[in-house]
Amino acid sequence: MKPANLSPKLLSILCVGIAIALGPIVLPEYQVSLANNIGIFALVTLGLILLTGVAGMTSFGQAAFVGISAYTTAYLATCDQLPDWLGWAAGSPWAALAIGLLLTLAVATLLGGLTLKLSGHYLPLGTIAWGLSLYYLFGTLEFLGGHTGISGIPPLQLFGQILDQGYELYYLIWVLVLVAVVVTLNLLDSREGRAIRALRGGQLMAESMGVNTYRSKLLAFLVAATFAGIAGWLYAYTQRFVAPAPFSLQSGIDYMFMALIGGVGQVWGALLGAASVTFLKQWLQDLLPHILGKNGNYESIVFGLLIVWLMQKVPGGIWSWLSPKLPDWKLKQAARVVETDERLNRRSQPLAGDIILDVKKVTRRFGGLVANNDLSLSVKAGEILAVIGPNGAGKSTLFNQLSCVDTPTSGEIHFRGVQVNGQTARQIAGQGLSRTFQHVKLLPTMSVLENVAIGAHLRGECGFLSSALRLDRKDEAKLLQEARYQLERVGLGSYLHVEAGSLALGQQRILEIARALCADPCLLLLDEPAAGLRHMEKQALADLLRKLRAEGMAVLLVEHDMDFVMGLVDRVFVMEFGQRIAEGLPEEIQKNPAVLEAYLGGAE
Amino acid sequence: MNYQIMMLLGQDGVTNGAIYALLALSILLVFTVTRILLIPQGEFVSFAALCMAAMEAGKPLHITWLLLALSLIALVMEIKDRYQTGGKLQLKAGDFAFTIYSIAACVLLTIIPVSAIGKPIQAVLTLALIVPLGPLMYRVFFQAIAAGHSLVLLIVSIAVHVALVGIGLLMFGAEGARIQPFSEGSIQLGGANINSQTIWVIAVSLILIVALYFFFEKTLYGKALRATAVNRLGAELVGISPELAGKASFSLAALIGALSGILIAPITTIYFDSGFVISLKGFVGSIIGGLASYPVAAIGALGIGLAEAFSTFWASSYKEVIVFTLILPFLLWRSLAHGGVEEEE
């Protein structure tokens, strides 16, 4: 293979791999042990980059996770009086790794399970409280050696090989770091990873595409905790001594700083961040006492102010400053369609003329305000229904109830014969209802193709493990091919690999329709699809909707643009003040006195 | 455990709990108005306590340098902002207020023999030094990113805390300090000795809570802050400047923090980094209040104080572990009570 054929991802892994392999040959011994520390830090930081940079959550408790695993390893390696039921684990590094990871994941599941359904502030606060709590616990528990910690951990022995030299551990640590990087890159470039990345586009969008956001958040948190757990195991065998200090909240904050300085959105930022913070810290610890004339933890002042400055000026970290210098790096890295003959399965579509959506006497009250009063309507397969009305008529309230974001106070909504009011947006997405948003919700820095592939989330089946191990390629090819097909169908076929944020607003609206179509829906709910579109774009959209209708799709749209509506739809449903004031064919509606009065004011 | 011990622990718990409650209120106030979780809240506490101690011991007050530095940075930022938006400098006398104030403070405090002027004046001087740090902190660190993502605000908040702890070490040194009590003696109530220090804490906390209530209910500025808390954009549209709201809420936070610091200074030994753990108990209180309810947060914080006092009796070394583990059941309760998907800003 010529170098030009290598993908940037493979190329970067190869380059870093070679650099790592050369490390101990060119570095003096002291630098090798420094590199070992950097590797361990990088592993923890990598988890934080996934958690904070990709999924938009924060944890200050990563150091505590490292501590749980390091202490487990140290305890099992040194204790000669293990209880009988644990006797099998004595002295075995594999058992220590397994038990350490198990404990780390148990604590992470508990914390994540309790906080991830709540708003974004509870996870960081919870991890701060628990980071402190575990730190005090390490310092208090007598069997963990209290504040003096556990020393005398025997060297690591794997497959009969004793690893006690710096360079031996170096290879172990950095191979694990590289594996973790590859796993993370694989994960991000998969169905499961897109779901995690979608969290930043708003949870409502992700849920409406069928993503279980709670599960995705927990998954990201657990992956980050796993990396921290492996780092703890390595730490115990590298230092051969554990004490509470490196697992304090302060260290948890340091890890966060490494992620931020390196570049929180990029996987390689973990290595950059861990290295630059370690070197900077060392340099400051030498320099500051000279300047200030006293000894103390003064580098924290510099780091604190550096982060403030970074957040105000370069929120992307070192990586964001570097990456524009690498041509088209990010987009070359983005997913490409691999041709496949297989197609995704389609759901059984209703026959033209079947009633798909049946709304019966729906009323929605907010306190004393009746936003929807006793509304009944239905949509058939192969029909376009427009809901129109002046501002404040209650269209959005109705739309929210139909898409299961909101629940009616009374009345019923039936979708394909099943009562759906009270279900969640995710459940209804699974049954074949797909929607777009009035204010476009997409991931601006992700490619158009990947954005649209989020819509097909429920039609893929590969989970975390197959994604991480790259066993999902067949599934993935089908998903991306479907996304490309839908993009070509809506006329965005030449924009597959550009950033979604660079499209014009009208194109972004069309992208949302393609994303909705990817879910293989039988009912499309469109929230003001023509808003912000130019004349030609509107015509193209109308043609697309006509084509969909001819294929048997049911469409319900809320719209203000009368020209667009009247020339396109089959029936119009007019609302004012939460009431239905008219319903019928477009030409009837245009002559209806009640409608004219609502829109133009009565003729006095 | 007998009645005497119970009263003693209860008294301890209420004293600490009252301070945690004050901090919880302050944290909630800042959070609802600005979306910032004010992690550096604790630094106001420790700086005020150590400032009192430095005055009592007649040591130099390095904190005036922090005040001066922040006010100069704020002035430079203000000039830069004006120049970039207007193209010319239109400075008013008011823009120099903080700078002049801190220069005056630097000069005055080297002249006045602060160690000999008595507790009440020392307390007033401490407030005069700490409270301006609040609005200056908002101006220098937060104003430029006030509209940013809440994750960015949180990270900056943590970073400011980390920097301030280092600066605290530089200003006050690594030794802890504890000041003489405000008054000696105790009173008998229901067969138990109530320490006069406890009465100070409870009285000041109650006065502060009542004062805050009147501020928010009766004054225009208080109502403006409440309006900002309900809807930031709406408040801005009716003419409430978000900068003013931010600075006002940070001033209140600094005031409450400094008062708490002065109150706690004779009760516990305070180190340069003690403020964080103290304020974190306020955070636990505000989590119990769901980051929204003032009364629930205050009661929760009081409960934290009591739990802490009683766990000192039964399992002294696990005190902090128990206190911070207490948030789990409340998180569970919040999580169960919570339905559906929450849309973040």
Image (cartoon, coloured by chain):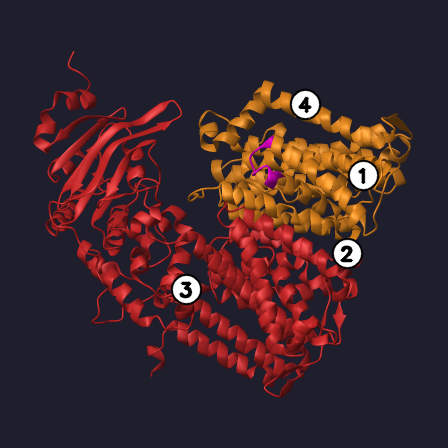
Residue B210, numbered label? 4
Residue type indicated by callout 4: Val
- Cα separation, mark 2 vs mark 4, equals 45 Å
- Cα separation, mark 4 vs mark 1, equals 26 Å
Badge 2, how many Cα within 10 Å: few under 14, some, many 20+?
few
Residue A188, numbered label? 3
Extent of the magenta region: B286-294
| Mark 1 vs 3: CB contact within 8 A | no
Q: Give the SS element for disc 4.
A: helix
Q: Which residue is mark 1?
A: B9
Residue A249 seen by the camera: yes
Q: Which residue is mark 2?
A: A292
- Cα separation, mark 4 vs mark 3, equals 53 Å
Q: Is residue A243 above or below residue A160?
A: above
Q: Give the SS element for disc 1.
A: helix
Chain A: its colour in the image is red
Residues at marks 2 and 4 on the same chain: no
The residue at the point 72 percent across, 26 percent down is: B206
Badge 3, how many Cα within 10 Å: few under 14, some, many 20+?
many
Q: Nearer the viewer, mark 1 or mark 2?
A: 1
Q: Nearer the viewer, mark 1 or mark 3?
A: 1
Q: Chain of mark 3?
A: A
